Amino acid sequence: MPVSAARKIAYDVLRRVEGEAAYATDVLHTELGAGVRADDAALATEIALGVLRWRGLLDFLLQRALKKPVERLDLPVAIALRMGLYQLRFLERVPARAAVNESAELVKSARKSSASSLVNAVLRRLAAEAKEPPQKFLPADISLTERLSILHSHPAWLVERWLARLGEMQTTSLLQANNRTPRLACSLHHPERREGILESLRKSGLGVDPGCFLQPAFAVTGGSPTRTEAFRRGDISIQDEASQTIPLLLEVQAGDRVLDLCAAPGGKTPSLARRAGKNGLIVAADRHAHRLRAMREQFKRLHLSDVRIVELDAATALPFGIQFDRILLDAPCSGTGTLARHPEIRWRLKPEQLSELNRVQVELLTSALNQLAPGRLVYSTCSLEPEENENVITEVLRGLPNIKRLTASEAALSIAPHLTGGIEPKNLFDDAGQFHTTPGGYQTDGFFAALLQKK
């Protein structure tokens, strides 16, 4: 039987994620062009991201029917098995026969015909127990860490560190949030035309919901906003609500000189440019040429012609002859706050990388503060880890008496005008005035930001 378009796309996405270290959302964006039917796009996305989220549990269950570890199988075979089992366990509307047979056909199309009988036999066996709860198959003497790691499909080292810091209840809540499909939030580039833009999205067949805590934000359901005229015109972008909040914390004023460091792919720059206005100066910098090319394309879609784009390594002395009134440093990080949106990160990240990232982040923040005029800098990450957040701020500020952290009350004033009714601004900040969101709290990614003021 032929393999459906949706499963072929999902397979290709997973092959590139596993074999080329690509990001699933990037590959999906490329694969799901206008020629792909909406229902095929939806199923391909569900299978690809679902397999990545639940890979740990899927491999645990598959292992019971295999003679060698899943990771030692040929990659096409491992992917086909994971796809088949994901459909059997998580997609009630997919017939078991289709899940099994098309997984076997995927192996054949990958020129691994000799393994198709293995895929067929393993999936048929596991189909018979697909309705059984996975708890049934856990060893009786399993530790809490291993239990949560398997049932919620996260690496054990990450579960262990969250348990030590957050406790069992908060850790379980976080793990559950990371396995839910994230809200598809969007930013609005022309707030003055809000109603007309939202109405055009509804006419294109999308459902539109208000933001959870940010007035300008909204979310869509029932399809991809990238297929709409509003997206092509540059009226909207896909952007998590917490991510939209970060540039607002800078309180950019008309005419400000603004530096956006580590700016690619440019999601936060438009908000900065809109507030600085025609008399302001906006510089967006990044060290990676290919990311700068993508950012240029993004700015072209958004009709942002006045942003100056610079290729540089921000961890070294910056090459500017001026200082900036406002600096946004959205530092490269582990991304542990985005595991629902980018599930492959959980399987790639290693514990030793956190200290490596900390070293780079300290260098970046030190360099950025040297370029700051009396004004404000926002340091942000999409990480939940103290090594990348609070520890970086503490280490850098230790020798800089002329830099202070804004208090929670001062920081809350930055975003109070932008929040929906009923949201208390101070609830978004800790006692040290640092901005926090966690997956599951406001249906956003997990973000951290520190607001620093130079006297």
Image (cartoon, rainbow, N blue to C red):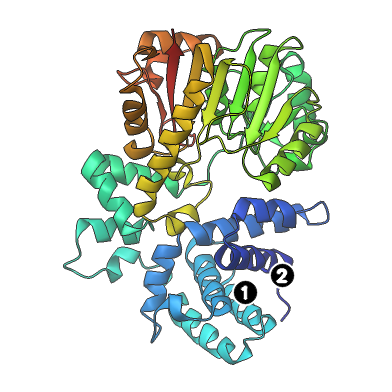
Q: Amino acid at mark 1?
A: Ala
Side of 248 where 163 appears, left or right: left
User: x%, y% of residue 320?
Assistant: 63, 24
Q: Quadrant of the N terminus?
A: bottom right
Is the residue 412 above or below the residue 268 in the image?
above
Residue at position x 35%, y 53% from top? 352
Front one among 422 and 350: 350
Residue linked to disc 1 = 98
Question: Is residue 453 among the parts visible in the rendering?
Answer: yes
Is the residue 289 above or below the residue 375 in the image?
below
- Neighbor class of circle 1 (other Cα within 10 Å; few <14, some 14-19, many 20+) is some
Q: Amino acid at mark 2?
A: Ser
Residue at position x 38%, y 22% from top? 434
Between discs 1 and 2, the one toward the N terminus = 2
Is the residue 284 above or below the residue 216 in the image?
below
Observer-side mark, 1 or 2, equals 2
Side of 380 where 21 appears, left or right: right
Q: Please, what secondary structure does the residue beneath circle 2 have? A: loop
Q: Please, what secondary structure does the residue beneath circle 1 have? A: helix
Most distant residue in the left direction: 141
Residue linked to disc 2 = 4
* Contact check, label 1 and label 2, Cβ < 8 Å: yes
Work out how far the residue at label 1 is from the one at label 2, CA to CA, in angstroms.
Answer: 10 Å
Residue at position x 32%, y 22% from top? 399
- Neighbor class of circle 2 (other Cα within 10 Å; few <14, some 14-19, many 20+) is few
User: x%, y% of residue 13?
Assistant: 64, 62
Side of 212 where 27 appears, left or right: right
User: x%, y% of residue 63?
Assistant: 38, 77
Front one among 96 and 425: 425
The quadrant where residue 298 appears:
top right
